[in-house]
């Protein structure tokens, strides 16, 4: 009896932090959970790995706007139109423009933040953090 209480206590100690603080993307299972959060305008993060790009007041924040009809608009130095698709099984967001086809794993999405991971062949995975701006 005493052993089962200790085992239960150990399991609770291991599980509790994940339960309380691990509100990760894995809890979002369906497209109905993800797509309403995704379909907004997102500011593309300017910070990557401890390097911060300074923006002059004349520059606008680079952004990507995911539309509910599967289209998107990327606004960096110029405006690029394309399309997107979300695969529920793999949790992969595919982005297609005239010049590129890219795939990102959605690591986390909330109403304020989108964290993506892109892995190119032969390169280390890169995480990108986007902040909702509209």
Image: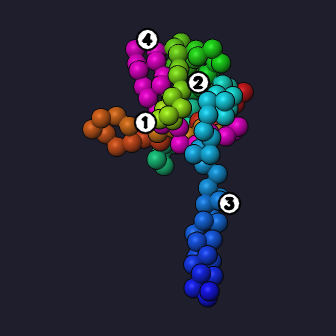
Residue 27, image x and y in percent?
62, 46
Question: What residue does disc 2 label?
Answer: 64
Q: Is residue 102 left or right of residue 129?
A: left
Residue 15, image x and y in percent?
60, 65
Asked if labels 2 and 4 touch by Cβ distance under 8 angstroms, the answer is: no
Asked if labels 3 and 2 touch by Cβ distance under 8 angstroms, the answer is: no
Mark 2 or mark 3, whichever is nearer to me: 3
* Magenta-drawn stretch contains 99: yes
Question: What residue does disc 3 label?
Answer: 20
Q: Is residue 122 visible?
A: yes
Mark 1 or mark 3, whichever is nearer to me: 3
User: Magenta part of the protein: which range?
Assistant: 94-112
Note whether 118 is above or below 82 in the view shown: below
Q: Earlier in the sequence, mark 1 or mark 3?
A: 3
Q: Is residue 51 left or right of residue 119?
A: right
Residues 104 and 46: in front is 104
Residue 19, image x and y in percent?
65, 59
Residue 128, image x and y in percent?
51, 38
Magenta: main secondary structure equals strand
Question: What residue does disc 1 label?
Answer: 118
Query: For the residue labelled by badge 4, is the local secondary structure a helix, a strand or a loop?
Result: loop
């Amino acid at each position: 009896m005493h052993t089962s209480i200790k085992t239960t206590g150990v399991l609770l100690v291991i599980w509790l932090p994940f339960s309380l603080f691990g509100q990760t993307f894995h809890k979002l299972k369906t497209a109905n959970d993800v797509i309403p959060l995704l379909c907004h305008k997102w500011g593309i993060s300017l910070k990557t790995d401890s390097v911060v790009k300074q923006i002059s007041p004349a520059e606008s924040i680079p952004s990507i706007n995911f539309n509910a009809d599967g289209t998107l608009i990327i606004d960096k130095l110029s405006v690029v139109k394309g399309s997107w698709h979300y695969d529920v099984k793999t949790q992969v967001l595919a982005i297609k423009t005239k010049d590129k086809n890219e795939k990102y794993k959605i690591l986390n999405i909330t109403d304020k933040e989108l964290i993506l991971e892109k892995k190119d062949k032969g390169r280390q995975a890169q995480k990108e953090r986007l902040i909702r701006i509209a």
